[in-house]
Image (cartoon, rainbow, N blue to C red):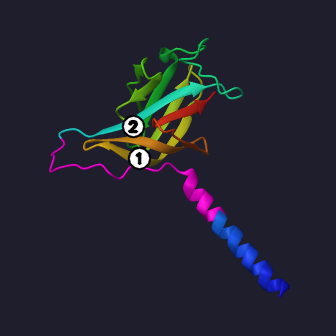
Amino acid sequence: MKHLLLIILASLSLFVSCKKKSEQGYQCKTDLICPAVVCVAYWSNLHFTIVDKATGRDLLFGSNPTLTPADIKLYKKQNSPYTEVPVLVDNDKKRLFTLQAADTMALQIKNGSLQFLVMKKFCADECCARTAVEMKHEGRLLIADEQKLIRFRY
């Protein structure tokens, strides 16, 4: 009887832990309706900001910013070398972004070493655009918030 109870508890905890993992990921909206549109260009977006590792304070758009957008460089991997992509500023939404996100990228802050990014999930925004919402940053999983904003810790 004790063994049966132990098996039931183990199975239940496994079920709950599997459910938690799926809830931790970003849930893309599935109600996007695209008529027969021919996309001349297809955008892959990445929306992000840099926050303090200890406090979570925004280092770019906070009350006392210690970084400027010029301190941030973003690269995407094309075949073998990394090539720099434009980083744009959205002061209204307090974020940086690129329209050229790729599956493998690198982030550089203040001429420091490259921090490697591997995109795990994109969500469709429009018929001809998608936004990165889950990625591995130096081996750590980052998940975007409701506004599809990724926060890098520095």
Q: Quadrant of the C terminus?
A: top right
Residue 149 bears which disc, if any?
Answer: none
Inter-mark Cα distance, 2 to 1:
10 Å
Check the image and name the residue furthest to the right: 2
Check the image and name the residue furthest to the top: 64
Judging by the rendered image, the residue that carries numbered circle 1 is 122
x then y, percent, for residue 107? 52, 31
Q: Which residues are magenta?
A: 17-39
**Along the polypeptide, which appears first: circle 2 or circle 1?**
2
Q: Quadrant of residue 47?
A: top left
Check if residue 79 falls in the magenta segment: no
Residue 101 bears which disc, if any?
Answer: 2
Please state which of residues 106 and 45 is positioned toward the viewer in this rendering: 45
State whether the magenta stretch is mostly helix, strand or loop. Answer: loop
Circle 2 packing at 10 Å, graded few (<14), some (14-19), many (20+), is many
Please state which of residues 16 and 123 is positioned toward the viewer in this rendering: 16
Q: Quadrant of residue 143?
A: top right
Q: At x 22% / y 38%, what residue is drawn? A: 41
Q: Quadrant of residue 53?
A: top right
Q: At x 75% / y 80%, what residue is drawn? A: 7
x then y, percent, for residue 113? 59, 28
Q: Nearer the viewer, mark 2 or mark 1?
A: 1
Residue type pointed to by label 1: Phe
Q: Is residue 5 above or below residue 13?
A: below
Q: Is residue 144 above or below residue 24?
A: above
Q: At x 17% / y 39%, what residue is drawn? A: 40
Is label 2 in a helix, a strand or a loop? Answer: loop
x then y, percent, for residue 20? 62, 58
Residue type pointed to by label 2: Ala
Horizontal side, residue 111 vs residue 128: left or right? right
